[in-house]
Amino acid sequence: MDTLSSTLAAGGDAAAAGGSVIPMWFMITSSIVVVAILVFDLLLVVKRPHVPSMREAGIWVGFYVFLALLFAGSLFAIGDAQHGSEFLTGWLLEYSLSVDNLFVFIIIMGSFSVPRKYQQEVLMVGIIIAIIFRGIFIIAGAAIISAFVEVFFLFGIFLLIVAYRQAFSSEDEGDGENGLIRLLRKRINVVDEYHGNKLRVTIGDTKYWTPMFIVFIAIGSTDVMFALDSIPAIFGVTQNAFLVFTANVFALMGLRQLYFLLGGLVDKLVYLHYGIAAILAFIGVKLVIHALHATDWEFLSWGHSIPEVPTWLSLSFIVLAMAVATIASLMKMKKDGVSFRDSAQSETPHD
């Protein structure tokens, strides 16, 4: 536990060389509150599996957005404007990138024909898995950055490549099955039909895994791949590991309800991937510039003359990119005669 605390604080100490350090009492208290809310949400889903109405989903999305803003406001209230603005920017960045998760969730749910009654549970488990793996990646990332600051060059170049693929790749998302799932199907006994929310059943004298187990693996393994994109991106906003983790948690917490709130709308926002690509490219450039400032390599000393990208500019760019992409998508929907309300209320393709 001491190792974890010191690792989470390490990024903050580095980032706060010219500013304040987040108090330990604040990190502990806020972490306990967030974990308690996650546990309550999980228990609610397990005990009462159902398809949430748009009103219920909207209330929960608003609640989690309010929590994130309350957390940011708390940082400002303790006099930490630097970390408050970094959290807001990081949270908006992760929330924007999580839209990609929604597209994949739709594909996976449709591919495995998950009953709508149990989709909340599947999404909640997937989100818990995502939080765990992102926590691991964040701790590893903070340790690597502390030992090898030049890794920001690799992060930046990686994000630029991902941005290009996001904008121009025409590859199909596939059927929701990755290599791991195909391997599992060959190695274990899996029944074709769902047995409620059970992961394993006994038929005759033979034990079988259910499709629900495969869906959990598909969601979890896919979330790991998303973490490979999002973690380097948010380290471009702040090197404080605690803020990186909380921004991820707050972005993921409302993702399940956002999935039901948007319904069939998300795959009709055809220009969103361009907005996400622009954000990733912007953060990639920012990381490269930061690396030029942070490295001691003499042949790159010219990079010190390039001004670093301030947090307020990152925040503004993220908001602008997503707003333009969303508005352009809605305008195209209107031009094509597609109703926003009907799309949002329509059932997703996996019913």
Image (cartoon, helix red, strand yellow):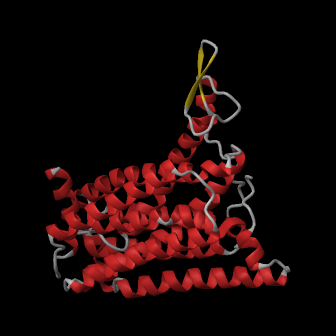
Residue 351 or residue 142, whichever sits in front: 351
Residue 188 visible in the current orientation: yes
Residue 168, compared with residue 200, is above or below; it is below
Residue 149's spot in the image, x, y percent?
Answer: 27, 63
How many marks the image carries: the answer is: 0
Residue 81's spot in the image, x, y percent?
Answer: 26, 86
Residue 322, compared with residue 143, is above or below; it is below
Residue 156's spot in the image, x, y percent?
Answer: 43, 67
228 horizontally vs 237: left or right:
right
33 horizontally vs 64: left or right:
left
Residue 57 or residue 164, whichever sits in front: 57
Residue 281 visible in the current orientation: no
Residue 151 or residue 137, whichever sits in front: 137
Q: Looking at this view, name the residue that lies furthest to the front.
A: 48
Residue beneath the point at 56% across and 54% down: 120
Residue beneath the point at 72% across and 60% down: 348
30 horizontally vs 227: left or right:
left
